[in-house]
Structures are given as C-alpha cells and as structure tokens.
Image (spheres, grey):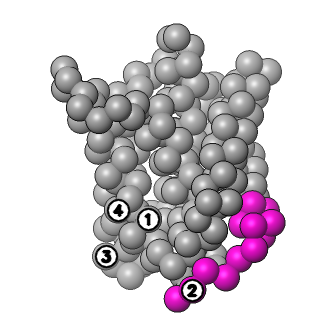
Amino acid sequence: MNNQTKNQFTNIVAQCKRLFEAKTNDYGPAWRILRSSSLTDQIYIKANRIRSLQTKSQQLVDEGIESEFIGIINYSAMAIIQLHLKPVDQPDLEMEQSLALFNEVLNDSYELMQRKNHDYDEAWRNMRVSSLTDIILMKLLRIKQIEDNNGETKVSEGVDANYFDIINYAIFALILLNEKK
C-alpha cells in the first residue's frame, strides 16, 4: 500500500474519531441500547440519502455527503461493537471504554484495508463514488437479510465482515471526494 493511501485513510479515521469522541462527550454511550438491526437501518438511511443526493439536482437539507459517509463509518463501528458486546437496557460504558472499543474497530478496519488493497491493487481508486455508495447499500441489504435470518448464513460472510467492508468503502469514498476538491 502506498503512503498516500495510508495518510488519507489515517486522516479520515482521525476525523471520525474526533466526532465520535465529541458526540460521546455530549450524549454518553446512549447508542449502547441499540440493537444491531437498528444500527443497520440508521446506516441505510444515511447511504440512501447519499444516493438520493447523487441523483437529485437540488439539496434541501444543509448537510453534505461527506458528513453522511462519516456517519456511516461511525455507526458501522458501533454496530460491530454491538455484535460483540450485545445491546443493553442502559448505557454501560465509560468514555475511555467507548473510545478504546471504537479505536479497536477502526484499527481492525485499517488492517483489513491493507490486506485487501494488496490483493486488489487499490482498484477502488478507479471507481466512482456513486458505485461505492451502491455497494454500501447492497451490503446493507445483505446485512438486513442475514439479520432477518437470525444471523444464519450458508456460504456467505457474516454481518461483521459486511460492516467492516462498509467502513472501508465509506473511507474510500471520502478519499475520492477529498481528491476532487
């Protein structure tokens, strides 16, 4: 993997971490009550809005595509944490624990990205942001189907693998958007 990708990935992850920390400071770990299916739906809403904005000529809400991709990354990290810890009735994590778990997920995502970039030769750099959006939506539909099947798959990757792919595709989309600026 080239240093440019490493730096771009690291910068976007740092931006996501700052937002996660600020929101955790404001709201605490209120997200801990969410079931993974609720997080899937929240991510779907964000991805669907991105697709909608990519196809419409007018935007009526003053929040751009970039902030939605960041939301997708952060909610996907929360979903992975929820898969491992299971949802609770009351928030149960301290700030430091929340941040450590979040950092662990994004570090795992980075390691996955490095392995896949090696094998795929950074093919994502030749993709359109709209294609990355569509792939994220497809992965969300896969997750919803797996969730509806009580987590059972016969030959497919599990839910967590799809969330990790979503994180990386959203980061790739942000890299491409930043390069166009």
Marks 1 and 3, how far apart at CA: 14 Å
Q: Residues within 10 Å of mark 3 (few under 14, many from 20)?
A: few
Type of amino acid under label 3 = Asp
- Badge 1 is on which residue? 39
Mark 1 falls on what kind of element?
A: helix
- Compare marks 2 and 4 and give the one earlier in the sequence: 4
Query: Looking at the image, is mark 3 or mark 2 earlier in the sequence?
Result: 2
Kindly report the distance in space between the C-alpha atoms of the residues bearing marks 3 and 2: 25 Å
Q: Is residue 7 visible?
A: yes
Is 91 part of what is drawn in magenta? yes
Mark 2 lies on residue: 90
Q: Which mark is residue 41?
A: 4
Query: In terms of depth relative to the viewer, which is nearer, 111 or 18?
Result: 18
**Which mark is in front, 2 or 4?**
2
Please identify, in this view, whether the residue under mark 3 or under mark 2 is nearer the observer.
2
Of pointers 1 and 2, the one earlier in the residue sequence: 1
Name the residue at 19% across, 20% down. 57
| Labels 1, 2: front one | 2
Mark 3 residue element:
helix
Q: Amino acid at mark 2?
A: Gln
Q: Quadrant of the N terminus?
A: top right
Contact (Cβ within 8 Å) of mark 1 with mark 4:
yes
Under tag 2, what secondary structure?
Answer: loop
Q: Amino acid at mark 4?
A: Asp
Q: Residue furthest top?
A: 181
Around disc 2, counting alpha carbons within 10 Å, would you say few (fewer than 14), some (14 to 19), or many (20 or more)?
Answer: few
Give me the C-alpha separation between circle 1 and circle 2.
Answer: 16 Å
Tell whether label 3 touches label 4 (CB within 8 Å).
Answer: no
Give the class, few, some or many, for how many residues have Cα within 10 Å of label 4's Cα (few <14, many ≥20): some
Q: Give the magenta-colored segment's residue range.
A: 89-100
First reached walking from the N terminus: tag 4 or tag 3? 4
Q: Residues within 10 Å of mark 1 (few under 14, many from 20)?
A: many
